[in-house]
Image (cartoon, rainbow, N blue to C red):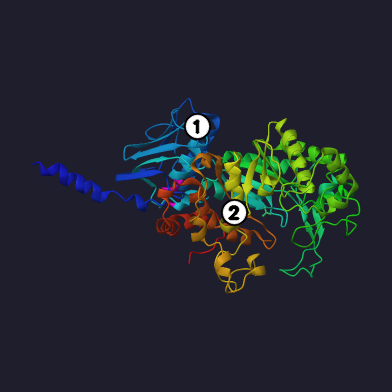
């Protein structure tokens, strides 16, 4: 008699799917499974009365989508899936309990409920992402208990829409995929030597002139130009549309105006912002890749007003707390001979000291001035790790790209940091050590068949990145998160953009979301093969096939 409960328990265990059979990316913090499933065809989907409007809207969209693909309406009544407000939970956390009698989803609000829905969708057949009814698919949620929350708060992806321009529809497609895998920041690189991409009302020439270049170098050959006028920009209405679309998916846009270098397109639009004697003249929107030596004349008050006007419009347009002000790769040679820059250096009493030149300190002055201008508008700055050189005011966030050293140093000094080292996070680098068969990428410029292995950022390499390595325990709270960057010098086509993003962005999602003990490359690859890649297929996304 005593054996009966044991046998029953063993039978129950045998019928339950293994947690490894549920292919959720990024892997949740904890997941247990039990026998049975909940049929969701025509199920009731109910929201707690105290839930916020954005969460209710996300649930309604889920119900509509489920109704469409199941071919049976899911109504906001009756037994089924209940969304329950739980104020004890942290904002991004959620819990899901699925029994054969019904499911309960708990979160404290948006985006917790939104993430729960993403997980529910990953428990269902991939047709849940489609636009066609698929009534014959197995519309069942497996019985399970999931409790989940992210490891890092900032889970970013950067798109360079300057070297090549991508349509609003393509950006929305990327946002759709980001939201499936719980990324929450799109860093939008909007100004460059090769093109200015954002409408600024006070300076119309930025888009009349600065958004267009007279051709583009061909492949990796600096001596060629295809002679084809190239460009484009986003109007403020389009940008508002993208901001709203992203917000519905739990994603905040971080706009970047890269200053005071990488500004040749702005100089082509307003030459008076340049340095005296700048060569070659006249300024032209750049048609080749690299780092232009032509930079803003930051000794001039007119230039500073320009920057404040531009950042003012950007701050008014984008609701997020961060504005990225670039700061990377600013050659300062022109400042050495420009009278206004030198007068400013004298006025501010800047000196070459401690290995930091007076001109580098002049850049500190620009950074600090933009930081306090934006602070008055309630915004914080992010800058590439060059902003750490010399003096940096409290409250700036450092994006560590030249390896991890800058991030380690900045966190130790008490600055917030986003880790984005080239060694793991640069998605413009080739994704397999195969120069012959991979499409032409920036890696092809310097790598040889012997060295390509070192610079390739494979899925496994990115997956293995540990952002807290070498960060002292008492500074780890300064690591806000991780971001991958896609620079687009050699990426002109949406299908190639997608190929370079996916599936590496899925590996990124686990670096950003999962605690180290939840990561397992073999399990992750199985999740990709069994579910996540078919999801990308359903989203119409191009991606590199698994090796
Ligand atoms: C960078 O890659 N220049 C930030």
Comparing labels 2 and 1, the label whose residue is closer to the camera: 2
| Crowd rating for badge 2 (residues with CA inside 10 Å; few <14, some 14–19, many 20+) | many
Question: Residue 304: x percent and y percent?
Answer: 82, 40
Q: Are marks 2 and 1 in contact (CB under 8 Å)?
A: no
Please provide the residue range marked out in magenta: 121-125
Q: From where the camera sits, is residue 73 visible?
A: yes
Residue farthest along the top direction in this orientation: 50
Name, please, the residue furthest toward the front: 354
Q: Which numbered disc covers residue 109?
A: 1
Q: Position of residue 193 (x, y in %)?
A: 78, 55
User: Considering depth in this image, is 466 or 58 the residue closer to the camera?
Assistant: 466
Q: Which residue is mark 2?
A: 421
Q: Quadrant of ligand 1?
A: bottom right
Q: At which x and y percent is residue 345?
A: 83, 43
Circle on res. 375: none
Q: Which SS type dominates the magenta stretch?
A: loop
Q: Is residue 285 above or below residue 408?
A: below
In the rendered image, the quadrant that contains the N terminus is top left
Position of residue 403 relative to residue 52, above or below, is below
Q: Is residue 207 left or right of residue 535?
A: right
Nearer-N-terminus badge (2/1): 1
Q: CA distance from mark 2 to mark 1?
A: 33 Å
Regarding residue 173, the answer to whether it shows in the image is: no
How far across and how far down the image is residue 469, in percent? 50, 50
Considering only vertical position in the picture, is 219 above or below 124? below
**Is 122 inside the magenta-drawn segment?**
yes
Nearer-the-camera pick, 313 or 345? 345
| SS label for mark 1 | loop
Residue 414 is left or right of residue 391, and the answer is left
Which of the 4 quarters of the picture holds residue 313? top right
């Amino acid at each position: 008699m005593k054996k009966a409960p044991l046998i029953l328990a063993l039978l129950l265990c045998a019928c339950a799917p293994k947690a490894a059979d549920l292919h959720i990316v990024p892997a949740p913090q904890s997941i247990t499974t039990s026998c049975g499933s909940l049929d969701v065809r025509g199920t009731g989907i109910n929201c707690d009365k105290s839930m916020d409007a954005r969460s209710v809207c996300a649930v309604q969209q889920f119900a509509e989508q489920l109704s469409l693909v199941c071919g049976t309406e899911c109504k906001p009544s009756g037994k089924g899936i209940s969304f329950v407000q739980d104020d004890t939970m942290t904002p991004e956390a959620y819990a899901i309990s699925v029994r054969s009698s019904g499911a309960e989803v708990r979160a404290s609000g948006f985006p917790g409920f939104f993430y729960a829905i993403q997980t529910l969708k990953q428990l269902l057949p991939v047709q849940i992402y489609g636009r066609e009814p698929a009534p014959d698919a197995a519309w069942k949620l497996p019985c399970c208990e999931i409790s989940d929350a992210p490891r890092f708060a900032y889970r970013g992806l950067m798109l360079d829409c300057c070297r090549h321009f991508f349509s609003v529809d393509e950006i929305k497609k990327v946002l759709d995929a980001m939201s499936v895998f719980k990324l929450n920041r799109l860093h939008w690189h909007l100004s460059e030597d090769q093109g200015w991409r954002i409408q600024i009302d006070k300076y119309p020439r930025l888009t009349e002139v600065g958004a267009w270049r007279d051709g583009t170098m061909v492949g990796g050959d600096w001596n060629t130009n295809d002679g084809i006028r190239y460009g484009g920009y986003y109007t403020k209405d389009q940008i508002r549309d993208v901001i709203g679309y992203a917000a519905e998916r739990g994603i905040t846009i971080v706009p970047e105006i890269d200053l005071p270098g990488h500004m040749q397109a702005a100089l082509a639009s307003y030459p008076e912002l340049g340095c005296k004697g700048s060569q070659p003249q006249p300024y032209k929107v750049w048609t080749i890749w690299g780092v232009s030596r032509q930079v803003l004349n930051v000794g001039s008050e007119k230039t500073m007003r320009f920057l404040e006007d531009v950042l003012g419009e950007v701050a008014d347009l984008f609701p997020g707390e961060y504005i990225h002000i670039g700061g990377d790769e600013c050659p300062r040679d022109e400042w050495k001979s420009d009278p206004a820059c030198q007068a400013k250096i004298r006025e501010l009493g800047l000196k070459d000291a401690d290995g930091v030149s007076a001109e580098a300190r002049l850049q500190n002055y620009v950074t600090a001035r933009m930081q306090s201008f934006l602070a008055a508008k309630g915004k914080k700055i992010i800058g590439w790790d060059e902003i750490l050189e010399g003096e940096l005011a409290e409250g700036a966030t450092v994006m560590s790209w030249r390896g991890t050293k800058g991030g380690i140093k900045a966190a130790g000094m008490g600055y917030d940091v986003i880790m984005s080292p080239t060694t793991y996070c640069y998605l413009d680098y080739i994704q397999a050590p195969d120069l012959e068969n991979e499409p032409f990428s920036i890696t092809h410029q310097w790598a040889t068949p012997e060295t390509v292995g070192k610079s390739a950022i494979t899925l496994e390499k990115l997956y293995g990145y540990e952002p807290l390595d070498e960060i002292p325990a008492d500074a780890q709270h300064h690591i806000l998160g991780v971001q991958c960057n896609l620079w687009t010098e050699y990426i002109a086509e949406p299908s190639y953009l997608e190929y370079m993003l996916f599936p590496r962005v899925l590996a990124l999602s686990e670096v950003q979301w999962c605690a180290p003990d939840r990561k397992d490359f073999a399990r992750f690859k199985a999740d990709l093969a069994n579910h996540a890649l078919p999801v990308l297929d359903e989203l119409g996304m191009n991606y590199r096939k698994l090796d």
